[in-house]
Image (spheres, helix red, strand yellow):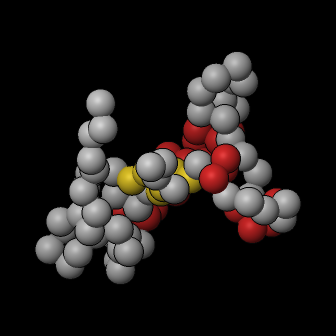
Amino acid sequence: MTPVANTSRRAWVPFVGLMLAVIDTEDAALLGRAAHANGTYPTPWKAVFRSAWALVMGVLLRRHRPNVFFEKNGKPIAHPVVIS
C-alpha cells in the first residue's frame, strides 16, 4: 500500500503532502505547480518561504479545522502499518 497523502503527527499542523505519482490528472490547475522537495531538483526558495508562510498563517487562523485526517480529539483516523 502507498499513502496518497502525508500529514504531520499533530492535528493542529495544517499540512498535507501529496504524492503526485498516485494522482492521475493532466490538469495543473487542480493541484498547482509541483515543488520538488528532494531528488535531483533543487527546492526553490520561493516555495520554501511560501510553504512556511502558509503553515504559520494556517496555525494562527486555525485552518486545520475540520481535519479529515484526524478525529476531533486529535487522534489520527488511520494508523500506519509497517510492512517490513
**Relative to 84, is 7 above or below?**
below
* Image location of residue 19, percent across then percent down: 59, 49
Q: Is any atom of residue 44 visible in this view?
A: yes
Where does the image place residue 21, in percent across and percent down from the top left? Answer: 67, 47
Image position of 25 with respect to 17: above or below: below
Q: Is residue 53 visible?
A: no
Q: Is residue 80 above or below residue 25?
A: above
Q: Residue at x 34, y 57 (%)?
A: 13
Quadrant hosting residue 71? bottom left
Q: Is residue 79 left or right of residue 61?
A: left
Instruction: Depth check: give the residue in front, 16 or 22.
Output: 22
Rendering quarter of residue 60: bottom left
Residue 35 position within the rendered picture, expressed as x and y whole percent measured from the top left: 68, 41
- Work out whether residue 83 or residue 45 is closer to the camera in this orientation and state it: 83
> Which residue is outermost to the top?
40
Asked whether, in this view, residue 47 is left or right of residue 32, the answer is left
What residue is at 18 percent from the left and 65 percent from the top? 75
Residue, far left = 73
Relative to 24, does residue 81 appear above or below in the rendering?
above
Quarter of the figure that contains the C terminus:
top left
Residue plotted at (39% across, 53% down): 7
Q: Is residue 79 left or right of residue 2?
A: left
Identify the residue at horizontal 59%, vertical 33% (top origin).
37
